[in-house]
Amino acid sequence: MSIKYAGIAMMVGIVLSVASTLLYPGNALVNAVDQTDFPAALEVIADAPTLAHVMIFLSILAMLLISFGAIGLYPLATRMGGLNGTLLKFGIIIAIIEWSIVIIGLGMRHFVTHLMQRATSAAGSDDQMLFEETALIIHIALTATLLASIAIYPFATMLMGLGLTKLIQTMNAYKISAYVLLVSGAVGLLTYLIAMFAPGDEPLVYLIIFNILLFIGSISLFITGLGMYRGSEGLAEEEPSS
């Protein structure tokens, strides 16, 4: 039953993550702006601080639920044994580290939103510029923090995808989603290497690619969560061959 609850947590977490990302001020559904334009991003936050706080909180909750779901896979990886089981366990650990870094970045985003609220309240005073400058500094720092999660993402995704392809014995939707995880992780690694060592003039292009990969990975994890929920009809609970 524990893997069933972990699967539910995984699916709910994915839905919350996608919804909170899309509804966050300045993103797809609300007054879209170039998130690499830091002053513009802060201005949008200042216009809708309550919405920003709510979406940040939901994003943190989503990361916790997804982490709980991933932990539910750990016993299956242990029973699988061998190199494949070890790689899956390592992938789960790296993924949880990645999501933990995201939570840290989201906490910083909470503080940035608070500072912009203070700046709005202090409009016309000397404190307004101080709050805005501090918010900008922290916003840049949180962007760098989230970049660390982007660097880890390809390895976590590839290892989890590879491990799940070995865990699931029959070719079905769950095994296909595992292969999608593996491929999206490989594409993410290639994109990251190009962005770091052969950057172009438009960093937004790389961010768009990563957002697409994250969305694809989210769908794959949702399907994995569904397989965990379905138990023996989804991800095999019996001991698979290594």
Image: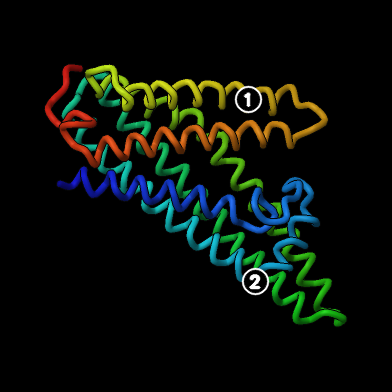
Where residue 208 appears, as percent x and y from the top left, is 66, 35
Name the residue located 21 percent from the left edge and 45 percent from the top edge: 4
User: In this rendering, is residue 9 above or below 162?
Assistant: below
Question: Which disc is residue 191 wearing?
Answer: 1
Q: In this view, does 226 lie to the left or right of 202?
A: left
| Residue 132 relative to residue 74: left or right | right
Q: Distance between the residues labelled 2 and 1?
A: 33 Å
Q: Residue at x 65, y 46 (%)?
A: 144
Residue depicted at x 83% and y 71% = 129
Q: Is mark 2 on a helix, strand or loop?
A: helix
Which numbered disc flags the more N-terminal residue, 2 or 1?
A: 2
Left or right of 26, for residue 62: left
- Label pair 2/1, CB-CB below 8 angstroms: no
Residues packed near mark 1 inside 10 Å, few (<14), some (14 to 19) or many (20 plus): some
- Which amino acid type corresponds to the residue marked 2 in the rendered image? His
Residue 89 percent across, percent down from the top left: 30, 32
Q: Is mark 1 on a helix, strand or loop?
A: helix
Quadrant of the image occupied by residue 224: top left
The label number, if any, that marks residue 114 in the structure image: 2
Question: Does 27 sit above or below residue 193?
Answer: below
Would you say residue 87 is visible in this rendering?
Answer: no
Q: Which residue lies furthest to the left in this view?
A: 238
Which amino acid does the dot numbered 1 rest on? Thr
Where residue 145 appears, as percent x and y from the top left, is: 60, 48
Q: Where is residue 193 in the image (x, y as percent from the top left)?
A: 64, 24
